[in-house]
Image (cartoon, helix red, strand yellow):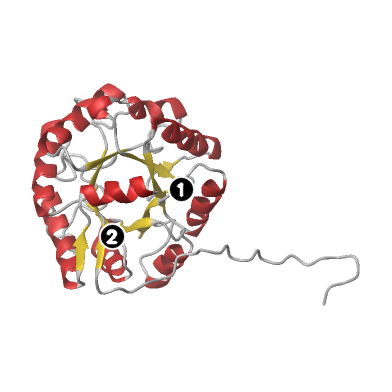
């Protein structure tokens, strides 16, 4: 019972328009490839594409299977992650050459550098090299051996640059707090409609690969969200199965996991990972959204 003159704290009412968890039997969903990432090297796997020609080879192979978009991390001549727009230009150009239609998403990762200027440099690409989307992680977080540092001012700074450049943010969500940030940035006018979201599970310091954890994040997304599930390490297939069953798409590739099996006995390739994810979708009656269909959804707002 409240005491006179005092007001007990009450949790805010859930905003209207929240997403319901829908188990559908016929749905078109996005499939997004993440072939490289910031971490994998030749020492980890011989299959990781580290050069523009290697990336183009893998994109051609997975696009033939069916793909909506590809998420690109640029590497320098020595194979190390690079933020420079000139480096990105070579990778984006190589992908455009083999598949002019596929949507291209560049990385603004905060793993190796936190400065806004470096992280936004690739967003200055123009003409045929201008990316369609760019990743935007919505909070700082720890991975197993490294942190991704994403201060609030940098997140908002990147979001503003994306709006100014007409590049769609692909929001990276690793826990329920980040799911809430989608709504916060939407209220601030920094996230356009529809929201494009990747939900990550399996990270040691984030949402785990369980139906309840994924379901909570899904339920907190805006109703217009175009979302996909992604699993880190051994949880890639688990995440895809849960996501597809719940009506979402998949993010798949060597960036998120290097092995095809949970026992870590067989190194994966990007085509093998995509083929497995699409086979799961086919079993559940899903059809991959084409790049043309995705662009139409984004243009419709």
Farthest residue in the bottom direction?
A: 1
In this rendering, position of residue 226 left or right of residue 41: right
Q: Which mark is residue 249?
A: 2
Numbered disc 2: secondary structure: strand
Q: How many numbered circles does the render carry?
A: 2
The residue carrying pointer 2 sits among few (fewer than 14), some (14 to 19) or many (20 or more) residues within 10 Å by Cα, namely many
Residue 269 visible, this orientation: no
Farthest residue in the front direction?
A: 300
Numbered disc 1: secondary structure: strand
Please state which of residues 203 and 96 is positioned toward the viewer in this rendering: 96
Residue 298 visible, this orientation: yes
Q: Position of residue 121 (x, y in %)?
A: 37, 26
In this rendering, position of residue 256 left or right of residue 9: left
Residue at left offset 78%, top offset 67%: 8
Q: Is residue 284 above or below residue 294?
A: below
Q: CA distance from mark 1 to mark 2?
A: 23 Å
Please state which of residues 47 and 73 is positioned toward the viewer in this rendering: 73
- Kindly report which numbered mark, 1 or 2, lies closer to the viewer in this rendering: 2
Mark 1 lies on residue:
141
Q: Position of residue 17 (x, y in %)?
A: 51, 63
- Which of marks 2 and 1 precedes in the sequence? 1
The residue carrying pointer 1 sits among few (fewer than 14), some (14 to 19) or many (20 or more) residues within 10 Å by Cα, namely some
For the N terminus, the image quarter is bottom right
In this rendering, position of residue 157 left or right of residue 86: right
Q: Position of residue 94 (x, y in %)?
A: 15, 31
Farthest residue in the right direction?
A: 4
Q: Is residue 245 above or below residue 73?
A: below
């Amino acid at each position: 019972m409240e005491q006179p003159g005092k007001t007990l704290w009450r949790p805010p009412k859930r905003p209207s328009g929240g997403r319901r968890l829908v188990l559908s039997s016929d749905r078109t969903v996005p499939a997004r490839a993440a072939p490289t990432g910031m971490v994998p090297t030749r020492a980890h796997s011989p299959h990781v594409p580290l050069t523009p020609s290697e990336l183009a080879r893998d994109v051609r192979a997975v696009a033939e299977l069916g793909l909506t978009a590809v998420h690109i991390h640029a590497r320098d001549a020595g194979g190390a992650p690079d933020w420079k727009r000139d480096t990105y230009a070579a990778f984006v150009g190589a992908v455009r050459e083999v598949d002019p239609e596929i949507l291209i998403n560049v990385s603004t990762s905060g793993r190796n550098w936190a400065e806004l200027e470096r992280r936004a440099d690739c967003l200055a690409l123009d003409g045929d090299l201008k990316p369609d989307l760019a990743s935007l992680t919505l909070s700082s977080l720890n991975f197993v051996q490294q942190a991704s540092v994403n201060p609030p001012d940098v997140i908002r700074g990147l979001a503003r640059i994306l709006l100014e450049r007409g590049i769609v943010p692909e929001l990276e969500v690793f826990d329920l707090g980040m799911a809430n940030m989608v709504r916060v940035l939407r209220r601030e006018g920094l996230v356009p409609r529809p929201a494009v979201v990747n939900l990550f599970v399996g990270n040691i310091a984030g949402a785990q690969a369980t139906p309840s954890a994924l379901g909570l994040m899904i339920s907190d997304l805006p109703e217009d969200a175009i979302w996909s599930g992604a699993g880190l390490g051994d949880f890639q297939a688990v995440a895809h199965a849960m996501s597809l069953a719940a009506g979402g798409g998949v993010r798949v590739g060597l960036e998120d996991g290097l092995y095809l099996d949970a026992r870590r006995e067989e190194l994966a390739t990007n085509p093998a990972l995509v083929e497995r994810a699409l086979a799961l979708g086919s079993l559940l009656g899903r059809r991959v959204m084409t790049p043309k269909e995705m662009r139409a959804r984004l243009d419709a707002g």
